Image (tube, rainbow, N blue to C red):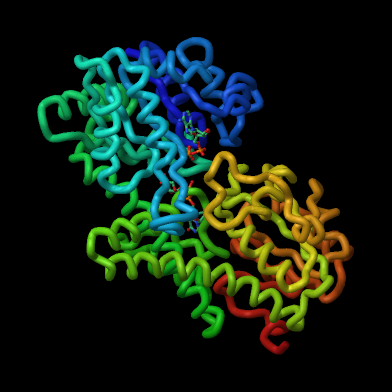
Amino acid sequence: MKIACIGAGYVGGPTMAMVALKCPDIEVVVVDINAARIKAWQTDDLPIYEPGLLDVVKQARGRNLYFSTDTHKHVGEADLVFVSVNTPTKTRGIGAGSAADLTYWEGAARMIAACSTSSKIIVEKSTVPVKTAEAISKVLRRNCNVPEVQFEILSNPEFLAEGTAIQDLYNPDRVLIGGNEDESGQRAIQVLKSVYEHWVPSERIITTNLWSAELSKLTANAFLAQRISSINAISALCEVTGADVTQVAHAIGTDTRIGPKFLNASVGFGGSCFQKDILNLCYVCETHGVPKVADYWRSVVSMNDWQKARFVERMVGSMFNTVVGKKIAIFGFAFKKDTGDTRETPAIDVVHGLIREGANCTIYDPQVSETQMFHDLSLAKFQWDYPMSPTKADAKIKQSVDVHFDPYTVAKDAHAIAILTEWDEFKTYDYQKIYDNMVKPAFIFDGRNIMDTEELRRIGFVSFSIGKPLDPFVKKS
Ligand code: UDX
Ligand code: ADP
């Protein structure tokens, strides 16, 4: 069997590396139109940072795992074609700001149709709106000129989380495969199932119809994001009542019906999936005549926006209602630890909010490059998932933002530190040394609740943590 995967990004790359590792009998080729990305996959300097990924790639690369820009050749030869291309939120036209832009998906489908001389199973990996398979199937059937070629479409949504992708792929909670309910649909499901059965126990492979699989992906992300917005909503209440959100989360999480995961209050959720998928879900609801359902889910996103805005307000309010000309040290720019990914990171909104107030931000992140930060801070909303987005740094951003690769330099002469990513190394610094070199009063705003607040207060910091009883200094001012 030959597999091709269109799209060598955060999903396609790691997923195919694991498939190749576990299925030495199958040839796997990952193709992409982005030549620089493909080139990087061929070296040990991979285009994405993911713990354990390089080791998996090195074991399979050159044996049965290949990366190529020759999309037509490899897709043409494949029996199974995974499609893992970008599905950004539309920036203009009907559904702008919520509907998924299927331009890249449709482009991939037309390319598959053009180069296919044999029948293929097409596997949707990227998140798509419900009923995309139906539309794609029409594009494929009407554009392939070889009458005996048949296409069977499956939905096989990815549930991996960045930072733990290898573990998630190696030992998934479940694999979901949706397909048509007729005989050839069921046959296609069995083919894909047999790939995963190389390492996933068959009882963990769930099969459904196509629409259920497509909708399950959106629903899973909406539920996860909803948990974070729910605990973040409670964090605001904790701060004004003197309750501690960590204690509340622990107390409710021990109820087995609720469970302990995804209850960490934070400055807000980010990443390429949560907001995009919820907005996409809302658009599907609106276009299918259930706007009340859309309103319900949209509130999860607005609570997240409020949490980010609230964090900035808390910073400015605590610092005597002005940050004009003040240096603010930003610890962490990635949307979570153990990844260099910055898509929809809350750091973008927080830095924008602080700049609007007149602050100067100096940023440190162990995995994000300066170019990436300026690129992200200069983009308009929803542009971040477009491969051809502009990269020219905005003049105002250049004036107000600085990047350093030493946290002590970043914090030197700063009025405040804002912790926006939960990198483990942030807990290991010499905070006495940092405090000594800051302007007083020295503030720390912990947007991830990773610091020992008592210890920071002992050193002399005025310290704020999400959802924790407020520092008396902050309360009084
Ligand atoms: C998510 C889903 O978890 C994954 O199943 C899906 O395939 C893609 O989207 P990902 O975006 O990589 O994965 O990361 P995730 O660990 O879910 O975190 C998303 C955001 O929520 C991050 O910004 C994270 O910091 C934040 N978060 C997570 C919290 O603020 N609190 C929590 O308790 C958990
Ligand atoms: P994800 O997080 O879903 O993996 P990424 O943006 O990281 O998304 O990756 C998607 C990849 O798909 C990009 O590298 C992009 O260049 C690639 N891509 C988009 N359209 C096509 C296409 N028609 N053919 C090949 N690759 C494509």
Q: Is residue 120 above or below residue 352?
A: above
- Please give the name of the residue rendered at 66% of the width and 26% of the height, measured from the top-left corner: 45
**Viewer-closest of 373 and 421:** 373
**Residue 224 percent coordinates (x, y):** 39, 56
Displayed quadrant of residue 21: top left
- Please give the name of the residue rendered at 47% of the width and 70% of the height, measured from the top-left corner: 303
**Residue 143 percent coordinates (x, y):** 30, 26
Displayed quadrant of residue 253: bottom left
**Viewer-closest of 282 and 90:** 90
Q: Residue furthest left?
A: 183
**Residue 372 percent coordinates (x, y):** 68, 45
Q: Is residue 437 above or below residue 91?
A: below
Displayed quadrant of residue 72: top left
Classify residue 197 as left or right of residue 88.
Answer: left
Q: Residue furthest bottom?
A: 476
- Please give the name of the residue rendered at 73% of the width and 55% of the height, measured from the top-left corner: 394
Classify residue 82 as left or right of residue 368.
Answer: left
**Residue 57 percent coordinates (x, y):** 53, 22
**Residue 474 visible here:** yes
**Residue 338 visible here:** no
Quarter of the figure that contains the C terminus: bottom right
**Viewer-closest of 96 and 78:** 96
- Please give the name of the residue rendered at 36% of the width and 24% of the height, measured from the top-left corner: 112
